[in-house]
Image (tube, rainbow, N blue to C red):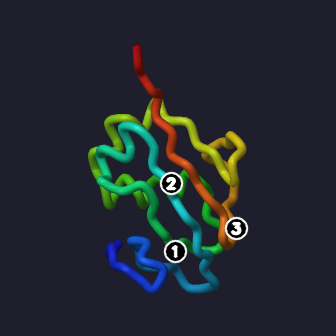
Amino acid sequence: MEVKTEGDNLPTATPVVKDGPSVQIKVLFFAKARDITGLTELSMEVSSGSTTQDCLNELVAKFPSLDEIRHCIVLALNEEYTTESAVVKDKDELAIIPPISGG
């Protein structure tokens, strides 16, 4: 997976896509996930039929330190909480939300 900048100035993760159609999604990073990746958002191309878990696996491959918080993050797909088995569609927005601490 390669991170590059495209016309919309969002970094783009371009993994090797399996044969067949692909979809473009936007990934949003919050709190510790943002600290680990150094990004607030990322445009990502994945194979059609990919689940949020597949997307998360690709993100952990690109940012191995995300694995430290993987067990406690919450995922949201298009502003609604979701599971790792949800299938992403073209132009979906996947949010990676770790626990937030404060005082």
Residue 42 location, quadrant: bottom left
Reading the image, the residue beneath label 1 is: 45
Coordinates of residue 36 in the picture (x, y in percent):
29, 46
Nearer to us of marks 2 and 1 is: 2
| Residue 35 position (above or below residue 50) | above
Residue 89, numbered label = 3
Name the amino acid, label 2: Leu
Q: Earlier in the sequence, mark 2 or mark 1?
A: 2
Could you tell me if the residues under marks 3 and 1 are in contact, i.e. CB atoms within 8 Å? no
Q: Could you classify mark 2 by the number of other residues whose Cα lies within 10 Å: few (under 14), some (14-19), or many (20 or more)?
A: some
Residue 101 location, quadrant: top left
Which residue is at 63% across, 45% downward? Answer: 76
Which residue is at 62% across, 85% downward? Answer: 20
Could you tell me if the residues under marks 2 and 1 are in contact, i.e. CB atoms within 8 Å? no
Query: Which quadrant is the C terminus positioned in?
Result: top left
Coordinates of residue 10 in the picture (x, y in percent):
43, 72
Q: Could you classify mark 3 by the number of other residues whose Cα lies within 10 Å: few (under 14), some (14-19), or many (20 or more)?
A: some
Q: Earlier in the sequence, mark 3 or mark 2?
A: 2
**Which of these two is toward me, 55 or 79?**
79
Extreme-front residue of the structure? 103
Q: Is residue 7 left or right of residue 90?
A: left
Which residue is at 58% across, 43% downward? Answer: 75
Reading the image, the residue beneath label 2 is: 28
Name the amino acid, label 1: Glu
Q: Could you classify mark 1 by the number of other residues whose Cα lies within 10 Å: few (under 14), some (14-19), or many (20 or more)?
A: many
Residue 83 location, quadrant: top right
Assign a secondary structure to mark 2.
strand
Name the amino acid, label 3: Lys
